[in-house]
Amino acid sequence: MPVPRYLIGLGMPAQLAKRLGLPAGAGDANTAGGNGYAAATAIGQFQFYVRANSQTSARTYIMTSVAEPGSEYSIFNIGGLTGGTTADIYPPSGGTFNVNGGATATMTQIATGKGIFLVAITASTFDAFLSS
């Protein structure tokens, strides 16, 4: 898979290059997540789809603080076949999620089998659409 900056160097628009290419060392999109805020797994700038894996206990994730406005992120909590638990997601430090018409800088929970769709408004502010 080509590196986005090489595609940009060839004249491709930046947003398209980031969608088509993967930076060297990009993390696995199926991540287990940390336990608690201090051990939260960071969702990188180029991780547009994350399968949150909260099969045995709640897992915690934190969004990137350098998102490019207009970038879209989808996070789906696969949970476990026997129920699983929530995936907890935080906005970046100093950032917010605009959920249900209100801004929040606190944790948002994603139930097993549910997801959240985030659109970056600024580098650290996201409009959020949470499945019910």
Image: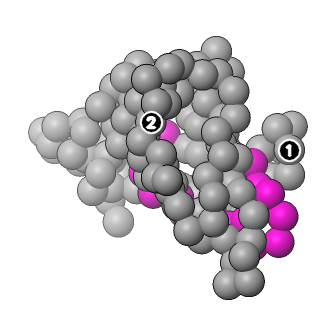
* Residue found farthest to the bottom: 81
Q: Residues within 10 Å of mark 1 (few under 14, many from 20)?
A: few
Q: Please give the name of the residue rendered at 69% of the width and 27% of the height, measured from the top-left corner.
A: 106
Q: Which mark is residue 128?
A: 2
Identify the image's colour scheme: rainbow, by chain, secondary structure or one colour: one colour
Residue 57 image offset from top left, x and y in percent: 84, 64
Residue 104 image offset from top left, x and y in percent: 60, 22
Contact? badges 1 and 2 (CB < 8 Å): no
Q: What span is in magenta?
A: 45-60
Q: Amino acid at mark 1?
A: Gly
Q: Is residue 103 visible?
A: yes
In the image, which is nearer the foreground, mark 1 or mark 2?
2
Residue 45 in the figure: left or right of residue 42: left
Mark 1 lies on residue: 36
Determine if the magenta segment contains residue 54.
yes
* Residue found farthest to the left: 11
Residue 9 in the figure: left or right of residue 127: left
Of residue 125 and residue 115, the one placed in the foreground of this image is 115
Secondary structure beneath dot 1 equals: loop
Q: Please give the name of the residue rendered at 53% of the width and 61% of the height, measured from the top-left corner.
A: 114
Quarter-wise, where is residue 14 in the image? top left
Quarter-wise, where is residue 40 in the image? top right
Q: Separation of disc 1 and disc 2 at Cα?
A: 21 Å
Q: Residues within 10 Å of mark 2 (few under 14, many from 20)?
A: many
Q: Please give the name of the residue rendered at 29% of the width and 31% of the height, measured from the top-left corner.
A: 70
Secondary structure beneath dot 2 equals: strand
Q: Is residue 30 visible?
A: no
Residue 73 in the figure: left or right of residue 90: left
Q: Amino acid at mark 2?
A: Ala
